[in-house]
Amino acid sequence: MTAKETILSIRDLSLWFGGVRALTDINLDIYRNEILAIIGPNGAGKTCLLNCINGFYKPQKGEIRFKGQKINGIRSDKIARLGIARTFQNIELYSGLSSLDNIMAARHILMKQNILSTFMYFGPAHREEIEHRKTVEDIIDFLEIEHIRKSIVGSLPYGLRKRVELGRALALEPKMLLLDEPMAGMNVEEKEDIARFIYDIFEGQGESYPDTPVLTDGVDSIVLIEHDMGVVMDLADRIIVLDFGRKIAEGTPADIASDESVIAAYLGEG
């Protein structure tokens, strides 16, 4: 059996706010070519874990390494540059801008021209903007949101805003994609669409989008927080379960489905 390649490792991670322990001694490896689901009751520490990975929270104890590089303590924008992007449980978009502008805004960390060159509209800065715009248009096409590309995000239905936020994360060209409840509040049809997009992002689209690597090749791994167990069982290669800030179980979907400690946690008995 070929050994799995670890692209992110977490060791003895603990996070607390005053006297409240949000995470306690979390140990976790995330492998290349897998969709990892994180499940658990509300307040279990799932979002806190993602916030530690992408630099929003600074854990008091432990270590996080991405492709061998220690990243806890690094600013969120630098972590994004390393190849980690995320969506949020509560949608974080520029509500007064269009869908196109929201996705385009994510490209700024990939732009090479300095502020002086941008004052000259024609030239290197203009050519660079055109290239980034092509990538954004591919993402809009992939997510099937052409009809809202010029619409102000604040006026859009919830499900479409979730797509725009996913598009903005893709625009960062991540190697690891962190998705915090991407289907929360959606109806069945909307959930099916997002599940399809997640799987297609993971697998890659080959030559359908030859000029946009994140769509052509897919991403190395996806970490998914989701309460819909049907979606989790369909998408995930592996699941970890948190309860009161501790990891209480880890395994394949079949393993987790038969684990009595998981069932007890969801019933409020754990």
Image (tube, rainbow, N blue to C red):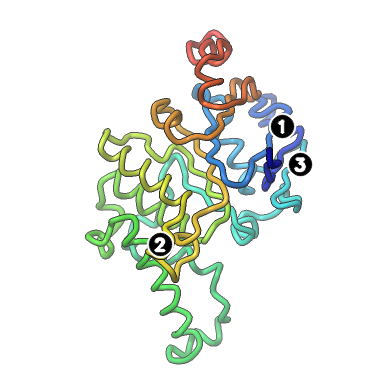
Amino acid at pointer 1: Asn
How packed mark 1 is, by other alpha carbons closer than 10 Å (few <14, some 14-19, many 20 or more), is some
Q: What residue appears at the point 33 percent right and 61 percent down from the top-left corner?
A: 140
- Say which quadrant the N terminus sits in: top right
Foreground pick, 136 / 116 = 136
What percent of the width, then of the height, locates residue 153? 31, 55
User: Of discs 1 and 3, which sits in the foreground?
Assistant: 1
Amino acid at pointer 3: Glu
What percent of the width, then of the height, locates residue 92? 43, 49
Amino acid at pointer 2: Ile
Q: Left of 91 or right of it: where is 7?
A: right
Examine the rendered structure and indicate whether residue 101 appears above or below residue 50.
Answer: below
What percent of the width, then of the height, locates residue 111? 54, 74
How packed mark 2 is, by other alpha carbons closer than 10 Å (few <14, some 14-19, many 20 or more), is many
* Earlier sequence position, callout 3 versus callout 2: 3
The residue that label 1 is drawn on is 27
What percent of the width, then of the height, locates residue 125? 49, 84
The residue that label 3 is drawn on is 63
The residue that label 2 is drawn on is 103
- Residue lying at the far top in this picture: please name it: 269
Q: Secondary structure at mark 3?
A: strand
- Gap between marks 2 and 1, in whole Å? 34 Å
Examine the rendered structure and indicate whether residue 52 appears above or below residue 144.
Answer: above
Q: Quadrant of residue 23?
A: top right
How packed mark 3 is, by other alpha carbons closer than 10 Å (few <14, some 14-19, many 20 or more), is many
* Earlier sequence position, callout 2 versus callout 1: 1
Q: Secondary structure at mark 1?
A: strand
Foreground pick, 176 / 206 = 206
- Say which quadrant the C terminus sits in: top right
* Earlier sequence position, callout 1 versus callout 3: 1
